Every structure is written in C-alpha cells, then in structure tokens.
Image (tube, grey):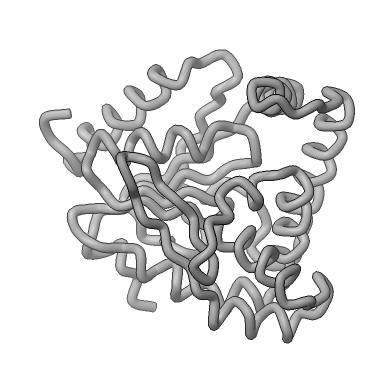
Amino acid sequence: MNDPASVVPVLTIDGPGGAGKGTISGLVAERLGWHLLDSGALYRLTAQAAVKHSVAVDDEAGLARLAEQLDVAFPVEEGQPRTLLEGEDVGQVIRTEQAGERASQVAALPAVRQALLQRQRDFCQAPGLVADGRDMGTVVFPDAPLKIFLTASADERARRRYLQLQEAGVNASLSSLLKEIQARDARDTQRSVAPLKPADDAITLDTTRLSIPEVVDQLTELLAQRGLVSGV
C-alpha cells in the first residue's frame, strides 16, 4: 500500500468520543499551519445524507453508494470552519447526540468504511496533516510518524459533553449521556472492521486531568522531538 503519510508528515489522533480529539486536533493544525481531517465528520455526513435521501442505517450497499458520491466541503469563513453537505450548512445538525449515534452505526459497516478510505487519504497534503478519528493510525495512515491515542474516563467525557450542551442551551441528562458514551464505546471497540484501539506504536495520552493548552503543548513538543516541525 502506498501510504501518503510516508511522504507528507501526519499526526494521527485517535480515541473515543469526548476525549477532546476535535478541539485538540484543530488547535494543533492551526498552530502548525497544517491541514485538518475530521474523519468523524465524514461518517456523520454520510449518516445525514442517509436521512436526507431516505436510506436506512442498515442498508450497507445504499450507504456505501452515498459515501462514494458524498458532496461535502469544509470552507473556512472569518476564521470559522463550516461543514457543507450538498451546499447546505449542516455543522450544527451533525453534532447532535442523535447524529452521533447514527454515525457510529454507519461507521460499523465495512462497505462504508472502504468507500470513505481513499477520500480520507486525499486530505494528506503538504506541509502536513492532523488526522482526527478512531482508526487514523491503525488503518488510514499506518505509516504516520506520530500516532496519538487520546482518551479520558467515561465519566469525564460525559461531564464535558454535558457542559457543552448546557452552554448551548440544550437540556441534557448526565446519566443518559454517560450511558450513550458507554454504549458507543462498546460498539466502536467491538466492531469487526477497524475497531477502536491504539495503534501498536501509538502514544496513549489520558486527558482526564489535563487542560486543552497542556495537551496541545505536549503534542507539538512530541512533533518537534521527532523532527517533524521546528520553531513551535
């Protein structure tokens, strides 16, 4: 396999939902001036396209066709990234708990994962890529020079999600969020294709008691130690 990560430096950040991957990945990419791949968004977008086109979440062939033809864009306007599906801004819609559940079901289907594999690898462009997901280091970019498995306790991840929803004015139950996170973890770790797990050569970083700036600093320092960046 010709892994693009063997030519362009790639930092993979895998881990369960709520560990801070999205926030951390975006901040690291911004600091370095690298490209960003939010692989989870592609699964959420596929799930949203399924809703839009009335394709059932267990219709593997139909979902794979949607994934192959997915019309998506991630433009940045006034410093803020947007998520477009068929020209429509769906950034808020795909971040709901319900959308996350659908995305997790879709991501468990082998044909969908295969359809999105090359699309993910196409994000690997100079000067570098920060790839955020669940199988970036194990499947999508196995030759990445630095792989991180970002995690946190289920209780802490539920608490973070609860606070996010509270700040957004959305009522939520902390106990329900914890159950949803535990169920998603079980599904993601037990699926037959690309289960959620650290790559053999990944560094596991527990963020339960770390601040966002501390994690960003640790990752950029690791990149510098490996000679992948300088002057950060």
- Residue 81 placement (x, y as % from top left): 40, 47
Residue lying farthest to the left in this orientation: 231
- Residue 6 placement (x, y as % from top left): 27, 64
- In this image, 53 relative to 180: left or right? left
* Front residue of 21 and 8: 21
- In this image, 229 relative to 218: left or right? left
- In this image, 131 relative to 49: left or right? left
Q: In which quarter of the image is residue 180?
A: top right
- In this image, 30 relative to 37: left or right? left
At 39% from the left and 68% from the top, the residue drawn is: 121
At 59% from the left and 76% from the top, the residue drawn is: 67
- Residue 168 placement (x, y as % from top left): 65, 27
Q: In this view, does 133 lie above or below 150?
A: below
- Residue 128 placement (x, y as % from top left): 24, 53
At 17% from the left and 39% from the top, the residue drawn is: 229
Q: Quadrant of the C terminus?
A: top left
Work out whether residue 189 can be spotted. no
Q: How many numbered circles does the render carry?
A: 0
* Front residue of 191 and 33: 33
Q: Quadrant of the N terminus?
A: bottom left
At 64% from the left and 52% from the top, the residue drawn is: 94
Q: In this view, does 2 lie above or below 172?
A: below
Work out whether residue 23 can be spotted. yes
* Front residue of 179 and 153: 179
Q: In this view, does 98 lie above or below 161?
A: below
